[in-house]
Amino acid sequence: MFRTGATIEDVMAAVQLTRGTVVEYLCEWIREKRPASVGAWVNDKTYRQVAAVAREVGLVRLKPIFMGLGETVEYDVIRIVATHMEAVK
């Protein structure tokens, strides 16, 4: 489903799993497949914002990224971007 760009909500409904579990599966898929883009789950502007802060504070922990973004971006989004950044570097 991720390969076709299904939303997290669509996957949740189809497989009857929680958002957190689906996001973890998505991150596993990103690590394995290394897609060129995660635009189906994170818009480009948000990706750029998260990536900019992540480059400053590192990818080891998500909280500094969350704080650097003024606590305005959900952890799931940060996790997806951080996973993608690591996968394609």
Image (cartoon, grey):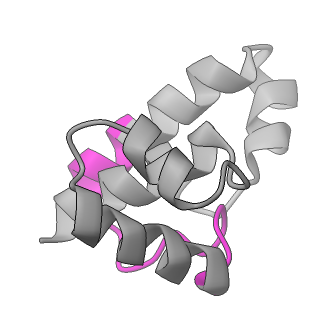
**Along the line of sight, which residue is nearer the eye, 66 or 84?**
66
Residue 34 appears anywhere in the view: no
Task: Give how far across and how far down residue 18 sits, in percent.
Answer: 74, 15
Q: Is residue 88 magenta?
A: no
Res 76 → quadrant: top right
Task: Give how far across and how far down residue 44 sits, in percent.
Answer: 61, 84
Compared across the picture, whether 42 is left or right of 13 comes to left
**Along the line of sight, which residue is nearer the eye, 75 or 41?**
75
Task: Give how far across and how far down residue 50 sits, in percent.
Answer: 48, 67
Q: Which residues are magenta?
A: 28-44
Residue drawn at (58%, 61%), measured in percent from left and top? Answer: 69
Task: Give how far across and how far down residue 29 sits, in percent.
Answer: 37, 44
Residue drawn at (20%, 59%), measured in percent from left and top? Answer: 87
Compared across the picture, whether 26 is left or right of 58 comes to right
Q: Is residue 43 magenta?
A: yes
Residue drawn at (73%, 43%), measured in percent from left and top? Answer: 8
Residue drawn at (25%, 70%), measured in percent from left and top? Answer: 55
**From the viewer's perspective, is residue 40 above or below residue 37?**
above
Residue 24 appears anywhere in the view: yes
Compared across the picture, whether 18 is left or right of 61 comes to right
